[in-house]
C-alpha cells in the first residue's frame, strides 16, 4: 500500500548528444566564481575539460580548479576542497566526472561553511545541514550512481576504515545535471559494467522490500528489463547510442527517489559493499556484484513470494509445475548468469578481501531493517565467507 509521501525532485536535467550546449544558459543562474571539481585526468584526456573551460570563459566565469577527486573520495580530499571553496568564496561547484566527483561536490557544498568537522557532523552523527550550502551542477561522464539527480554523497575515511553515505535533502540535490551518453563511451569496460550493476542493484535494494501491490514495483521491473536488454547490447557494442543512452536514463531513475516511494527498502548489499570499499578501495559496483549472489540466496527464503515474482517478471522463468523455491532459485541463477556474461567480479577475494578482514568489514556494516530479514553480524560474516 502506498502511504503518505512527498515527492519533489528539484534537479533540472539536460539529456542527449547536445546536452553540453545548455551549460552556458545554466551559468547565468550563478555568480562569477566557479569551483571546477574533476577526477584523475579522464576529462583532460578525452577533451571534455577544454570544452567546459571554453564555455566557462565565454560566460566570463572565474574558474578555480579542484582536480584529483579520486574514486571513493576521501575525507582528506574533502577538507582540502573546503579550504579552497572558502578561500575563494565560490558561487557554484561544477562537478565534471562520475559519481565520485558528483558525490564529492555535494559533500563540499554542505561542508565548506560548516563550523564543525563535516565528517563527524554529517557522516558519523548523520545530522542535517544548518549552514550555507553552495549550489552544485554536474556534467556526468560515468553512469551508475544516480548522483546526478539525488542527495546522496558517499565519503570514505581510510584511517577509520569507514565508507559512509549521507542522503541529503532536496536543498543539496544538484541544481542541474548535463547527461550526454556519448561522454560515457570512453569508459573502460570494467567501469561500464560496474556501473550497470550498480544501477541494477539500486533497483533491487528498493524492490526487495514489502509484499504489497505497489506501483513502484512495476516501475522497477520495467527498469530492470530495459537495463538487462541494453546491457547485453552495450557489452558487445559499447558505442551503441541507443543502448548507452537507455542505460544512462535508467541509472538516473533507479536512484532519484522515485523507486523508494511506498517501500521500506533494503540497502544491505550497499552496506556490505561500502564496508568492503573502506577496506579495499575497490570499484563500487564490483563490491556490490561480488556479494549479491550470496546475499540474495541468503534472504530469499524470507521474501520468497517477491523472489518468485522477480524470477517470473524480470527473468521470464516459467513457474508451471515448479515449487516457489525452485522458481525463485532459477531467477537468481538467471541473474548470476547475466552477471557472468557482463564480466562482473563475483568473488570478494578478487577485490583484495582476505579472511582477516571479515570481522572488521562486518563491524563497519550498518545493519538496516527495511528488507526481508534484519542481518546479524554473524549473518554478514557468513555472506562474506560465501562470497569469497
Ligand atoms: O578520475 P577519472 O580520471 O575521471 O577516472 C574515472 C574513475 O577512475 C573514470 N571515468 C569516469 N568517467 C570516465 C572515466 N574514464 C574514462 N572515460 C570517462 N567518461 O571512472 C573511474 C570511476 O569513476 P567514479 O566516479 O568513481 O565511479 P562511479 O560513478 O561509480 O562513482 C562511485 C562513487 O559513488 C558512490 C560510490 O560509493 C563511490 O564512492 N555512490 C554514490 C551514490 C549516490 N550519490 O547516490 C550511490 C551509489 O550507491 C554509490 O554508493
Ligand atoms: Zn550504488
Image (spheres, rainbow, N blue to C red):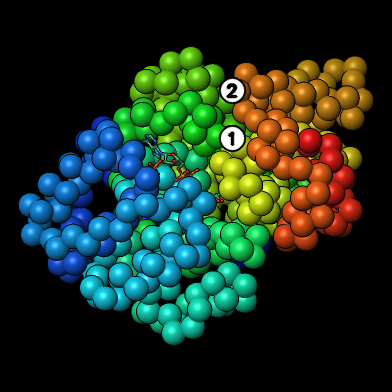
In front of the other: 214 or 158 = 158
In front of the other: 72 or 239 = 72
Q: Secondary structure at mark 1?
A: helix
In percent of width and height, residue 171 lies at 41, 69
Q: Which mark is residue 11?
A: none
In front of the other: 331 or 212 = 331
Mark 1 and mark 2 in contact? Answer it, CB < 8 Å: yes
Q: Which mark is residue 342?
A: 2
Q: Which mark is residue 197?
A: 1
Taking the spot 43% from the left edge, 59% from the top edge, the residue there is 104
> Compared with residue 249, is residue 152 higher up or lower down, i.e. above or below?
below
Q: CA distance from mark 1 to mark 2?
A: 9 Å
In percent of width and height, residue 34 lies at 22, 62
Quadrant, the N terminus: bottom right
Taking the spot 44% from the left edge, 28% from the top edge, the residue there is 188
Q: Residues within 10 Å of mark 1 (few under 14, many from 20)?
A: many
Would residue 270 be visible to someone looking at this image?
A: no
In front of the other: 374 or 163 = 163
Report the residue that reaches farthest toward the top. 236
Q: Would you say 173 lies left or right of 1 here?
A: left
Taking the spot 65% from the left edge, 30% from the top edge, the residue there is 345
> Compared with residue 22, is residue 246 higher up or lower down, i.e. above or below?
above
Would residue 148 be visible to someone looking at this image?
A: yes
In percent of width and height, residue 113 lies at 37, 79
Sooner in the amino-acid sequence: mark 1 or mark 2: 1
Q: Give residue 181's quadrant in the image.
A: top left
Amino acid at each position: 500500500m502506498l502511504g503518505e509521501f512527498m515527492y519533489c525532485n528539484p534537479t533540472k536535467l539536460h539529456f542527449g548528444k547536445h546536452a553540453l550546449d545548455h551549460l552556458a544558459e545554466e551559468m547565468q543562474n550563478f555568480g562569477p566564481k566557479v569551483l571546477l571539481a574533476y577526477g584523475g585526468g579522464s576529462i583532460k584526456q578525452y577533451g571534455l575539460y577544454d570544452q567546459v573551460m571554453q564555455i566557462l570563459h565565454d560566460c566570463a566565469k572565474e574558474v578555480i580548479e579542484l582536480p584529483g577527486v579520486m574514486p571513493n573520495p576521501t575525507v582528506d580530499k574533502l577538507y582540502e576542497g573546503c579550504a579552497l571553496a572558502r578561500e575563494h568564496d565560490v558561487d557554484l561547484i561544477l562537478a565534471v566526472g562520475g559519481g565520485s566527483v558528483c558525490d564529492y561536490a555535494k559533500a563540499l557544498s554542505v561542508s565548506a561553511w560548516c563550523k564543525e568537522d563535516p565528517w563527524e557532523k554529517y557522516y558519523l552523527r548523520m545530522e542535517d545541514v544548518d549552514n550555507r550550502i553552495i549550489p552544485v551542477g554536474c556534467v556526468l561522464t560515468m553512469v551508475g550512481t544516480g548522483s546526478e539527480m539525488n542527495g546522496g554523497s558517499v565519503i570514505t575515511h581510510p584511517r577509520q576504515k569507514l565508507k559512509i553515505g549521507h542522503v541529503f535533502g532536496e536543498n543539496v540535490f544538484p541544481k542541474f545535471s548535463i547527461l550526454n551518453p556519448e561522454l560515457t563511451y570512453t569508459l573502460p569496460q570494467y567501469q561500464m559494467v560496474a556501473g550497470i550493476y550498480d544501477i541494477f542493484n539500486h533497483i533491487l535494494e528498493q524492490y526487495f522490500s514489502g509484499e504489497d501491490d505497489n506501483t513502484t514495483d512495476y516501475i522497477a521491473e520495467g527498469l530492470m528489463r530495459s537495463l538487462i536488454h541494453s546491457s547485453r547490447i552495450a557489452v558487445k557494442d559499447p558505442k551503441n547510442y541507443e543502448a548507452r543512452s537507455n542505460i544512462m536514463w535508467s541509472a538516473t531513475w533507479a536512484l532519484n527517489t522515485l523507486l523508494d516511494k511506498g517501500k521500506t527498502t533494503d540497502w544491505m548489499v550497499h552496506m556490505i559493499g561500502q564496508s568492503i570499499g573502506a577496506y579495499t578501495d575497490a570499484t563500487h559496483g564490483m563490491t556490490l556484484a561480488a556479494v549479491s549472489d550470496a546475499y540474495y540466496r541468503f534472504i530469499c527464503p524470507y521474501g520468497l513470494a517477491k523472489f518468485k515474482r522477480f524470477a517470473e517478471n524480470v527473468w521470464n522463468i516459467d513457474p508451471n509445475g515448479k515449487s516457489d523455491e525452485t522458481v525463485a532459485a532459477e531467477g537468481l541463477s538467471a541473474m548470476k548468469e547475466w552477471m557472468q556474461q557482463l564480466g562482473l567480479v563475483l568473488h570478494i577475494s578478487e577485490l583484495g578481501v582476505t579472511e582477516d578482514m571479515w570481522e572488521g568489514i562486518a563491524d563497519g556494516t550498518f545493519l538496516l531493517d527495511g528488507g526481508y530479514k534484519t542481518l546479524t553480524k554473524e549473518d554478514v560474516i557468513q555472506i562474506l565467507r560465501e562470497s569469497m
